[in-house]
Amino acid sequence: MPIYFGEVAPHCPISRDQPVGPMQTPSIRVRTNIPRAHDLASAIAAVNILRSIVIQITSDRTINNVYTKSPPKQPKPDQDKTIDKTRLARWVERKELRVKRNYKYIGTDKNGKEDDEIYAIMERIEVMVWYDRAWKGYLVWRYGDKGEGTPA
């Protein structure tokens, strides 16, 4: 695939009634090699041109507007018949057995006395049940009585 260097990128009009543009695409005879660098700006331009050529040659998979196929993937090795416990969580929560209760927390005023007008109602998880798929056992977690809040 030829690379053209010029002020306007190479293009192809879609139909005959569209204008081609202010400049025609330069022919390949205009620039057949990388320009010689004579100052910093031209050196940077030459390095950028060389970089685009190297990248196009080494990493572009399009040859003559035809995409090459990707290499075939390696087949996965056969797995044992045992259960892979890393794929499936061993412990799962039994959400239908979860117990929640609402509690009312009463605030205090600046003197340290409880003020019934300042309160918050919060939902607290009291019991959670976990099930072990491997050993087929249960683990029960209870919040316990911590002496805080009043059941609402």
Image (tube, grey):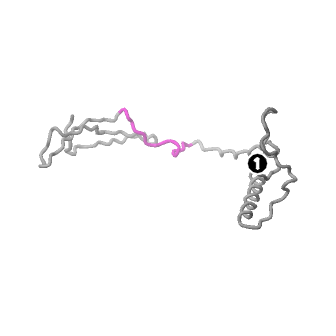
Q: Is residue 14 above or below residue 25?
A: above
Q: Nearer the viewer, residue 104 or 131?
A: 104
Q: Nearer the viewer, residue 113 or 65?
A: 65
What segment carries the magenta color? 82-96
Q: Position of residue 47 (x, y in %)?
A: 74, 61
* Magenta stretch: includes residue 7: no
Rendered-image quadrant of the C terminus: top left
* Magenta stretch: includes residue 95: yes
Q: Is residue 101 above or below residue 85?
A: above
Residue 76 in the figure: left or right of residue 1: left
Residue 12 in the figure: left or right of residue 116: right
The residue drawn where x is 76% and y is 54% is 58
The residue drawn where x is 52% and y is 46% is 86
How packed mark 1 is, by other alpha carbons closer than 10 Å (few <14, some 14-19, many 20 or more), is few
Q: Quadrant of residue 145?
A: top left
Q: Which residue is mark 1?
A: 8
Q: Position of residue 60 (x, y in %)?
A: 75, 50
Q: Position of residue 102 (x, y in %)?
A: 25, 35
Q: Nearer the viewer, residue 100 or 108?
A: 108
The residue drawn where x is 36% and y is 42% is 139
